[in-house]
Amino acid sequence: MHTVPGIRILACALLSVAVIASAQEVAYPKRGNIEITVLFPAGSSADVTARLLAQGIAKNLGANVMVVNRPGAGGAIGYKYVASQKPDGYSLVWNSNSISTTYHSGQLAFDYRAFDPVARVLIESPVLAVRGDARWKTLADLINDAKSRPGKITVANSGVGSHTHITSVALFKTAGVDVLDVPYSAAQIVPSLLGGHVDAMVQLPGALAGHVQNGAVRILAAVTQKRDAALPDAPTAQEQGVEVALDAWRGITVPKGTPRTIIAALEAAIRATCESADFIQGSDKLFVRPAFLPAQEFGELMANEDTQLARIMQSIGLKK
């Protein structure tokens, strides 16, 4: 059998292109630093958990991984930045339920579909907390006081339209009481409580770990489906008769159009990180729970939760 010269040349050329493409894919990460954009400031729950994750990704990929804080507008600034970057695997965002809350509150022009999912990493339990010396010992104590003094008890959250804001509004609306919501930046919310500027706060526990351990902060309720193993002494709101549960998750997404081979490499590195003893022990210290989901399942979760959060925000008057 004879091969036509032109066809032979074309076949060789195509094979060369395939080999080069394959080599380029295998080489990821082959340049510079991988950057994880954190949507909230240094010291926030998002920040401390991202740095724990970055250490694991760096180890498992053999790459430099940098955490860069781009806070503001409930996460919109960071989301806009990453969405505008090249889909090459070097710009990641430490995303959360905030992709939906920020969009549905009108602060972001695009939704979760602007990104490709890589993996869910962990779950955090939003909690209602007060100072350690506060007179309220239980959720019922605070609710009963709020009923006797409508609009007088101040409750901090980490920004209008944030997950903690929505959780707070849903919690007290369901309980049938009127409190005064006070939005702060994520960096200000804990100092505002410790300084006595507000009576209570709804916050994610990563930023509270040390304060709970030394008795400066008391958790009255975890606003979750079930009691969190990381917070075994914190009863859920549901256990205390208030039927609200709004678990928070965090994960990694990348700009839309990122090659599947790169997503697969990142997903594998994140899975290995989540299963490592260092990450599990570090998560326990931060009151968060490793909860790996691969890219496809993570994408399905984001789509389903976007619908649910839109409905919740509509019901409490926060959906634009």
Image: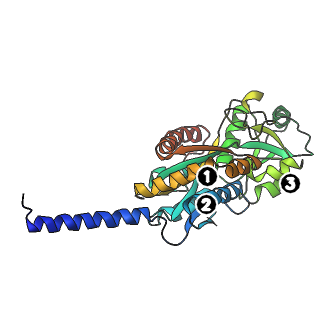
Please tell me which residue is depicted at 65% across the width and 39% down the height of the picture: 246
- Can residue 115 be seen in the rendering of this structure? no
As helix, strand or loop, the secondary structure at mark 2 comes to helix
SS at mark 1? helix
N-terminal label among 2 and 1: 2
Disc 1 target residue: 273
Secondary structure at numbered mark 3: helix
For this view, does 252 lie left or right of residue 197?
A: left
Q: CA distance from mark 3 to mark 1?
A: 34 Å
Question: Mark 1 and mark 3 in contact (Cβ < 8 Å)?
Answer: no
Whether residues under marks 2 and 1 lie with C-beta atoms below 8 angstroms apart, the answer is yes
Label 2 is placed on what type of residue? Lys
Q: Which residue is mark 2?
A: 59
Q: Residue at x 82, y 58 (%)?
A: 191
Q: Quadrant of the N terminus?
A: bottom left
Q: Categorize mark 3 by other alpha carbons within 10 Å: few (<14), some (14-19), many (20+).
A: some
Which of the labelled discs sits on residue 291, or is there none? none
Contact flag, marks 3 and 2 (Cβ < 8 Å) = no
* Residue tagged 3: 194
Q: Position of residue 213 (x, y in %)?
A: 86, 48
Q: Which coloring applies here?
A: rainbow
Quadrant of res 241: top right
Query: Considering only order in the chain, which callout, 2 or 3, is on the residue closer to the N terminus?
Result: 2
- What residue is drawn where x is 47% and y is 66%? 85
Q: Amino acid at mark 1?
A: Thr
Q: CA distance from mark 2 to mark 1?
A: 8 Å
Q: Earlier in the sequence, mark 3 or mark 1?
A: 3
